[in-house]
Amino acid sequence: MFVDYLSTILTTVHKVPGPVDPEKSFQELDVDSLSLAELGAQLEDEFEVTIDEEELTPSTTVAELAVLLESGGAVLPA
């Protein structure tokens, strides 16, 4: 579920060309460090989770971030 949500954010807010391959890293998707920091801050605010800098790096994949959010207790609104 979070993979779809993250893909939508990446294509609409961060202008990543879709479709987003969840197994690609943010570096492979050409997400720059500023956009990555903004994404992390947005997710922390929206889902009230903490994402450490070591967990969200250019080498992190979309799928890994989705797992991180789920394991941190984030819940998508119905």
Image (cartoon, rainbow, N blue to C red):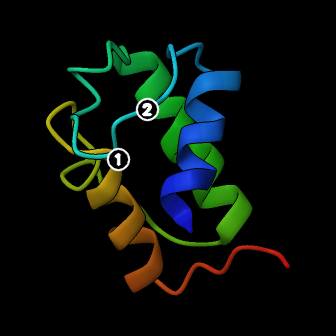
The answer, for residue 26, to whether it is visible in the render is yes
| Whether label 1 touches label 2, CB < 8 Å | yes
On the rendered structure, is 40 left or right of 59? right
Residue 25's x, y, as percent?
21, 34
- Could you tell me the amino acid type at mark 1? Val
Q: Residue furthest front?
A: 19
Q: Residue at x 50, y 13 (%)?
A: 17
- Dot 2, how many residues are within 10 Å of its Cα: few (below 14), some (14-19), or many (20+)? some
What residue does disc 1 label? 62
- Could you tell me the amino acid type at mark 2? Val
Between 22 and 42, which is closer to the camera in this rendering?
22
Q: CA distance from mark 1 to mark 2?
A: 9 Å
What residue does disc 2 label? 20
Q: Residue at x 44, y 18 (%)?
A: 34
Residue 30's x, y, as percent?
32, 12
On the rendered structure, is 50 left or right of 60? right
Q: Residue at x 38, y 84 (%)?
A: 71
> In what element is the residue under mark 1?
helix
Query: Residue 9's image quarter?
Result: top right
Q: Residue furthest right?
A: 78
Query: Residue 47's image quarter?
Result: bottom right
